[in-house]
Amino acid sequence: MKLKTLEQINLTDKTILYRAPYDIDVKDVNGVLEVVDDLRIQATLPTIKYLLKENCKIVILTYVKRPDGQIVEKLRTTPHARKLGELLGLKVDKVDDCVGPIVEEKVKNMRGGDILMLENVRFYKEEMVDDDEFAKQLCVGKDLVVFDGFPQAMREHASTTGIERHLPAVAGFYLMNEVNMLSNLLENPKRPFTVIIGGAKISDKVDSVNNLLSRADRVLVGGAVANIFLKAQGKNLGNSFVEDVFVDEKRREKKDWVMYAKEILETYKEKIVCPEDLIISDGTLTRVINISTENVPEGWMALDIGPNTCKNFSDIISQSQTVFINGPMGKFEDVKFAEGSKIILDAMKNAKGETIIAGGDTINLVRTYEKLEDYSHVSLAGGATLEFLAGKELPALKALQ
């Protein structure tokens, strides 16, 4: 996918509406709200520094969580402005609104190199319905949109598709990095290409799994996602979590994931690799079973992949030139059931090819037991990453092409 970039246009002295991906939780630290995780802010620093080099006035627009059109004090962007200022070593001004005369006056008085953080755009109900008049107000006094909100590119909101209707728009470096990496994964991965799917649910990954199945050489399944495939093979999984039926309330559809897994196993039986052993627990005792020959007893749960599976998965990873992982192999929050995930991460870290980490739980896993720098790429976009890998067009990227 080819996008219009910063380097293709003259930015000197321009007033930039910078659409940032700062949808980040906050926490209370000694009475002061601070961002929980600054990874997304760090990812935007190359774009912001480039704009500063061009003597731009930078007006930052983002939403934070779901205040549903109400002013929620703990969802203000003040902590995000403070953290950005710390990382840049510069003053980042903050205004307690995102439209209106106070904002317009602030923007009018900015000088080159100034940075202004706008208030959470979701304090306005007009944001989530992509109200065109509201989108127009967001653009007042700005010359250009620089769009770095890849995690929000799947949304048709006033601060995504709306602002792009009223100002010319180009992609920021963070967005370009995500799009280039994911495009390469779909169009031209180095082979063998191995996909690892874990976590608790398959419902939020199913479209991306479908799209990747036709492109990958091997698909390794772990975590509770593996339970669906094992159940499809007729295994009794005791009290293990199995997302066997999912009800889509919006579409009023019921989906049977076990039937889905059966169809996939029939179509891609040479590609899909399921666990051969599992670590199970009854809440007190823990043991390993060979799921090929045993069932999980009633009252017991599968909570991690076993040692034989770890070795098999690691061997496949070591021979791969591209490895993509989304989701842990077990209940990694409990150290007793983290070993499988840790071994897979170690295998990826030692692999010779490209290694891509995606998904919030996967990132938390890596930050708990490894270092993010040990992997080629970390996708910070969550749902947008999965939508992109599913081959779906992200609405906010249309204006950037």
Image (tube, rainbow, N blue to C red):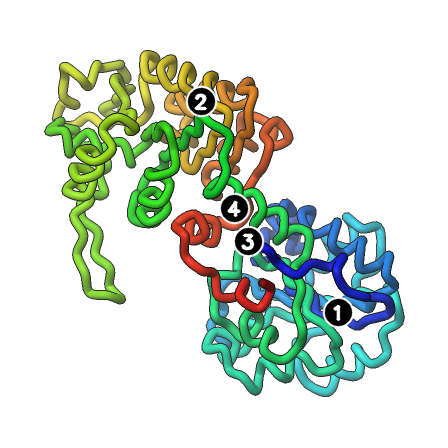
According to the image, label 1 marks what residue?
Answer: 16
Q: CA distance from mark 4 to mark 2?
A: 24 Å
Secondary structure under tag 2 reads helix
Please tell me which of labels 1 and 2 falls first in the chain.
1
Q: In this rendering, which labeled residue sits more in front, label 1 or label 4?
A: 4
Q: CA distance from mark 2 to mark 3?
A: 31 Å
Other-residue count near label 4 (Cα within 10 Å), few / some / many at <14 / 14–19 / ≥20: some
Secondary structure under tag 4 reads helix
Please tell me which of labels 4 and 2 falls first in the chain.
4
According to the image, label 2 marks what residue?
Answer: 344
Please tell me which of labels 2 and 3 falls first in the chain.
3
Asked if labels 4 and 3 touch by Cβ distance under 8 angstroms, the answer is: yes
Q: CA distance from mark 1 to mark 3?
A: 24 Å
Asked if labels 3 and 1 touch by Cβ distance under 8 angstroms, the answer is: no
Q: Is residue 25 left or right of residue 198?
A: right
Q: Residue at x 60, y 73 (%)?
A: 164
According to the image, label 3 marks what residue?
Answer: 1
Q: Is residue 341 depicted above or below 41 in this figure?
A: above
Q: Which of the 4 quarters of the picture holds residue 2? A: bottom right
Q: Is residue 86 depicted above or below 12 in this figure?
A: above
Q: Position of residue 81 (x, y in %)?
A: 72, 60
